[in-house]
Image (cartoon, rainbow, N blue to C red):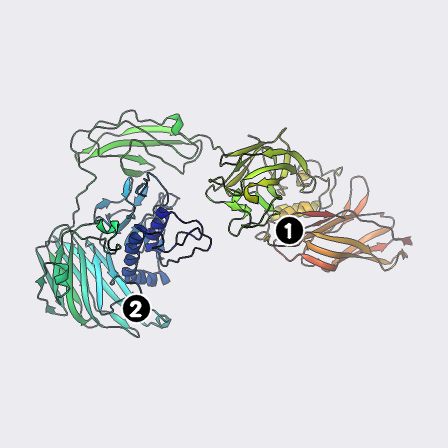
Amino acid sequence: MDGIFGGKNTTVNIRDFQWKTFTPMQLNMDGWGSSQKYPHAQGEPVASINRNYLKLKSALLPYQYSIAKEAVNGLPIIRAMFLAAPNAYTQGIATQYQYLFGPSFLVAPIYQATKIDEKGNDIRNNIYLPEGQWIDYFSGEMYAGNRVINNFEVPIWKLPVFVKSGAIIPMVNPNNNVSEIDKAIRSYELYPAGNSSFVEYDDDGKTEAYKNGSGATTLITSSVTDQNALITIETTKGNFDGFVKNKATTFVVNVTSEPKGIEAEIGNQKVKFTKAKSLDELATLQNGYFYDAAPNLNQFATAGSDFAKTIITKNPQVIVKLATTDVTANRVVLRIKGFEFKPADKSLITLGTLATPALAKLAEKDRKAFTLQPSWMKVKNADFYEITFNDMIYSTIKDTTFLFDGLKPETGYEFKLRAVNKAGYSDWVSITAQTAANPLQFAIKGIVATTTAENQGGSGINKMFDFDEDNVWHTKWGKNSIPFEVVMDLKSTNQLEKIQYLPRIDGGNGVLLKGSISYSSDKLNWVPAGNFEWARNNSIKTFEFKDHPTAGYIKISVTDGVGGFGSGREFYVFKVPGSSSFISGDINNDKTIDENDLTSYRNYTGLRKGDGDFDGYISNGDINKNNLIDAYDISVVATQLNGGVKIGKADQLSGSISLVTKSTTFKKGDVIEIMVKGKNLASVNGISFGLPYNTEDVEFVGVQPLATKQMENLTYDRLHTSGKKALYPTFVNIGNKEVINGDADLFIIKLKAKRNLTFKLKPVDGLLVDKTLNTLKF
């Protein structure tokens, strides 16, 4: 609750307790926070508001337990909107900040400040209501569905929760612990409309006996015909250890006027009712009912607190209480004559003619890459405005402007606007506009980075390259990290324009202040690009690359940061506008890394500049620009295949390589076995070298893998265009495999002597590579 970080924010604390009431479980945990996260820790009115919601959660346990049972083989407890209303609107991100809690509740959390005041009171926009009628749980106001409602007022105590018309909600007495639940009473809150039903489920709540069928189900149905409501509780089926079959029954039926009559049957026996004059009197009756004209939902505020004076009323309710009966033998029927639930639409209050909204437009300042914000003049007599966009109605707009987000850059859109009041609607007026260009259009995506500094758990350097400005990277708390380096693998070769650094919003610990930037094509040879010195604040910092160099790696060497840390929200690395990116390793230029690229490398291992096939597209595969296709170039592809490598803590790449033969002299026909040995190896994920030889002396027989047997063998016996011959032993791990550490016999090269000779072959261009593409020459 309220996150493991942060704290001391009453609004965040309250809003979190509100929406998580409608989730399966809540947990207090504040180990990294600045304050306790308990529901009462921040005093009043926080304690009172949170207590009300926690009591509501406890009372909803039978409903939640029933939908949990349904979730075993059916829909989940928390339901994305597209599960209930699959359409173009719900199958995108438009409803990402709302959900259904089972079939009956629609929850729209307050996830951002929209028009918040100093007390935390706010509004919520963009609440999508599926087809049908939806009732505000806390007020009883009813809203038509198949539209998006806006300007929904949410004082600090209120969460947008809507109940589906026809809902049947099993409940229990509010409690602090399940041991306080009165198992001899069952209670149902209902919103009768049309025909509806709900299956209540219960079991012992402690064991797994339910897996063997130990449990009980009860079908409740509701129907409304000609202002008569019929509610039926069928006999309970099943049994479990601890089941109480003799239960009293309570109905809480939502209405908008007092019914004309109440009738009930238990089994086949009619019930004689007493009409109570108060809830206190009803509590003394076995069979009775009470018409509560103005229920006050604020029942659990701290006594004597200011919030205890807040009255939270909703629509009237009829509370019916029936005597104890054997629920496995007797069904219960409730009939309400003169039933009515027709809440007045409080958003429609004004009469009078409506003009078409004037000056409906999209000003240049309101035209962004991903958002458009139409505006218009206020219309006399208008209660609110409606906009149609992409076949969806955005209703109850109270302002004279409205923001649409999640749009595509440089795309044309059309909106239709009208004014609404109790008398009707104005004519529609059209607004057309095109979104602006994406300011991040040329920011390079897919960057992977490492730091020489240890990072805080959950706040790794990956946060700086995810194009999400709402999360933060931070080096290890409580540990000085200066100096340190950030090395970026751009995963492509680009002509660099600039870097933008977005510090944390508060401009606090870890804001980078001083350092230098360099670039490289192979992560081995670095070219200085310049120094930076940035102010301690939250403004965007920019570093421009002079002469727009081409590179695949960038290194930021930090020499000063606030508090001795490093932190930030994002690094954006921009390529020169209009320039192309070459994806490192995409040797066939199909814009993806796959087995086809590995096949190309297999065919071109050992190819050098000067060879006939090298110049052209193959040279693009020479990623480290050493004029040779080697283990490094191949590793760029291999580390991305089969799910890619998993980067964890590893030793720094190190070790030495030697070539050993049993003799230095050989006779014609002898097979020369060259043992390739590694000493003090660490983190070796790939190896390659060249072994030039005279074809008049020897011929290549083969390679026998030893410690490299889990690696892909890409060894190539190559005849260069120059006429020279060289063997290129090359082994690389594909995907995530064990690296080679320690002393090891790596592989045996077998050559056959064509004449008597003295062995004098020497390796050239030797290279060891690790999982993060660091290299070590030998």
Amino acid type at circle 1 is: Lys
Residue with the mark numbered 1: 771
Residue with the mark numbered 2: 179
Nearer-the-camera pick, 668 or 552: 552
Amino acid type at circle 2 is: Ser
Q: In this view, does 180 lie to the left or right of 13?
A: left
Q: Is residue 391 left or right of residue 593?
A: left
Estimate the x, y position of residue 614 in percent, counting from the top left: 71, 38
Task: Report the residue that reaches farthest toward the front.
Answer: 304
In which image quadrant can residue 380 be found?
A: top left
Nearer-the-camera pick, 315 or 392: 315
Estimate the x, y position of residue 422 in percent, counting from the top left: 17, 36
In which image quadrant can residue 39 be found?
A: bottom left
- Residue 589 in view (yes/no): no
Residue at left 47%, top 42%? 468
Estimate the x, y position of residue 159 in percent, counting from the top left: 30, 48
Mark 1 secondary-structure assignment: loop
CB of mark 1 within 8 Å of CB of mark 2? no
- Residues under labels 1 and 2: Cα distance? 55 Å
On-image quarter of the N terminus: bottom left
